[in-house]
Image: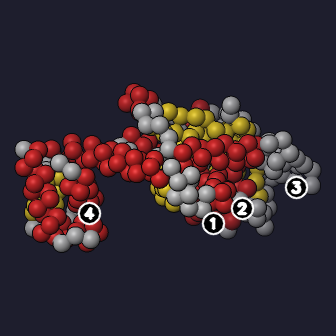
Amino acid sequence: MNLEQLRGFVEIAQTGHFTRAAERLHLAQPSLSRQIATLETDLGVELLHRVRGNVALTAAGERLLPIARRMLADADAARDEMADLAGLRRGRIRLGATPTLCTSLVADVLAEFRERYPGIDIEILERGSRSLITALMEGGLDLALIVTSVSSGAARAVLEREQILSERLVVVSDPSRPDPFGRDSASDTPVRPIEMAELARVPQVVFPENYDLRVTVDAAFRAHGLTPLVAVEGAEMDAALSFAERGIGVAVVPAMVAADHPTLRTAPLADAALARTVSLARRADMAPTRAGAALQAVVREIADRVTAPGAELSSLVTRVL
């Protein structure tokens, strides 16, 4: 069993097709087929079902896939570690982040990191926190910025988390229309926080049910015995902000996301507990490469900058130490 065989196996599992996998690996299809046949012979099991040109994993293939991914990730980490000897002049970092963090915190982190280390390639995976945790455990990522707590015992045993900051949730709406909460902008300075009962009576643009943000807000409504008035359901972040800007409904978003859209009217929720904690996660059983450690340091610096006294969001975003 060698890395080329494992790489071919993983590519076939991802594409579901020998021909497409061979093209992506720049191999002739017969060569790839021989690699897989040799791998199956060495392991003594059938890994793939071949049906009418398509490919599906056998039970043995399902068991091997996460192991193969981890082995390939470890090999890549070894190469990156050796590249570190060049003094951070080259290398690669695989960073995962949630969609809302990619449009706020991550953008600032990457801009700063690229300025300091232009030779380090950065690969971004934009997914929900649960998917990012799985990718970390399988070795598909070096670092991830997540916004949910790790609940499973397996994840706790494998991952190391560092809480970075906590940000309040805010309500955004169309400033060209009358305030949906009946506030007088002249007298409500600073902006009066919004109670959950007020929010429930206003048409809202809500996210898909699997969004961590949606889960948090729904739980707050249930805790108050309230049923929200929904205008649109299932919108992703960019769409939700666009709908709010057009007056279709208000949206509850993280403070850092709202700050990147200054044309929207913004007000915090009155319940300070309605916040999310952003954590930097990595595999505990793998020491970070020098490039990974450098990226972690930049994340901490940006978090310090965003939460510093006098910063624009200092009242809504706080550093977790």
Mark with earlier residue (1, 2) = 1
Q: CA distance from mark 3 to mark 2?
A: 19 Å
Distance from disc 2 to disc 4, alpha carbons, whole Å, reads 38 Å
Quadrant position of the C terminus in the picture? top right
Q: Secondary structure at mark 4?
A: helix
Marker disc for residue 15: 4
Q: Earlier in the sequence, mark 3 or mark 4?
A: 4
On the image, the x and y values in percent for residue 208 come to: 49, 52
Please give left or right for residue 9 compared with residue 151 in the image. left
Instruction: Please state which amino acid type lies under the numbered disc 4.
Output: Thr
Task: Tell me which residue sits at (33%, 44%) in the image.
Answer: 70
Query: Residue at left 61%, top 35%?
Result: 163
* Residue 54 on image: x %, y %: 16, 65
Secondary structure under tag 1 reads helix
Location of residue 79 in the rendering, given as x and y in whole percent from the top left corner: 40, 51
- Read off the residue under disc 2: 261
Q: Are marks 3 and 2 in contact (CB under 8 Å)?
A: no
* Disc 1 versus disc 2: nearer the observer: 2
Q: Which mark is residue 242?
A: 1
Q: Does label 4 or label 1 sit earlier along the sequence?
A: 4
Mark linked to residue 185: 3
Q: Nearer the viewer, mark 2 or mark 4?
A: 4
What crowding class fits label 4: few (fewer than 14 Cα within 10 Å), some (14-19), or many (20 or more)?
Answer: some
Give the amino acid at mark 1: Ser
Cα–Cα span, label 4 and label 1: 34 Å
Crowdedness near tag 2: few (<14), some (14–19) or many (≥20) residues, C-alpha within 10 Å? few
